[in-house]
Amino acid sequence: MIFCVEDDVSIRDLMVYALETSGHKALGFNDGRELFDALSQEGSIPELIMLDIMLPGEDGMELLKKLKANPATNNIPVIMATAKGTEFDKVLGLDSGADDYLTKPFGMMEMIARVNAVLRRFGKQEDNEDIIESGNIRIDIGTHTVTVDGKDVALTLKEFELLQMFMRRPEHVFSRENLLSEVWGIHYAGETRTVDVHIGTLRTKLGPYGKNIETVRGVGYKFR
C-alpha cells in the first residue's frame, strides 16, 4: 500500500490512479491529520508515503519530521513532492530523512519509476544474511533492529542502510558519491552534504563505537 498526501484533489486522484494501474495499491489523503489518522489504524503501515511539501496546516517537512521521530513509522520510505526545485529544498528534505523527491510538475511515468526505485532499494535487504555483527554492534536484517552492547539503538532507514553497508565491507573506503548513489539512489555530487549529516547522527547513536566510522580525508568514509 502506498499513501499519497496531496491537497490538490485532481493531482491526488491522478497519482492514486497511476499507482493502481501500475500494480500498486494506493490511498490518497488531503493533509497530515488524515495521514496520521490512517497510520493510527492497526495494520495500516504503508510500504511508502508520497508527501507533498505545500499542505494546509502542517507542511510536508513538519510531517516528515514527525514520521521519522516515531519508531512505528521512521522506517517507512518517503518521497517528497514539491513545486520548489532549488537545491536547498532538496538537501533539506534529504537531511530530514526523505528517500527521494519529485519536483512539480512531474509526469506519472516519472513518479512510478521513482516509486519503484525506492521500493527496490528498501526491499533489497531481503536477499542478504539476517545477522551482521562487528564487535559489540549487531544488526538484525529480519527485524530491522540494531543493538549496541546488547541495547537497542533506534536508527532511521538511511542510518540503518549506511551502517549495514559499512559493516558488510569493513576497511573498504566509500566515497560520499558512492554512498549517496547506493543508499539514496541519486547521483548529484553537489548534494553529498546529506551523507555527512547522516554519518554524524549515526556516529552519535553508536556512542563510543561511533569512532569506528572513520573519515578518509578527501575521499569519504570507512568502517574499522
Image (spheres, helix red, strand yellow):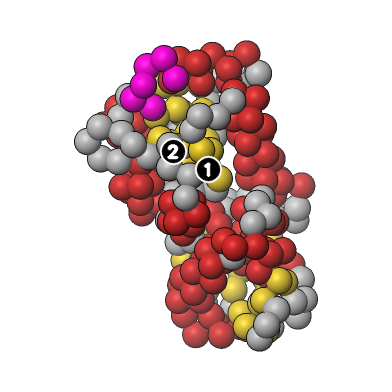
Location of residue 196 with respect to 157 vertically, above or below: below
- Determine the CA span between mark 1 and mark 2: 8 Å
Residue nearer the viewer, 215 or 102 = 102
Q: Amino acid at mark 1?
A: Tyr
Which quadrant would the C terminus be assigned to in this image?
bottom right
Q: Which residue is mark 1?
A: 101
User: Residue shown at 22%/36% (left/top)?
Assistant: 57
Q: Amino acid at mark 2?
A: Thr
Q: Which residue is mark 2?
A: 82
The stretch in magenta equals: 6-11
Query: Secondary structure under badge 2?
Result: strand
Residue nearer the viewer, 3 or 12 = 12
Location of residue 103 with respect to 71 vertically, above or below: above
Quadrant of residue 117 within the rendered picture: top right
Residue 212 appears at what percent x and percent y? Answer: 61, 83
Indicate which disc residue 212 carries.
Answer: none
- For the residues bearing labels 1 and 2, Cβ distance under 8 angstroms: yes
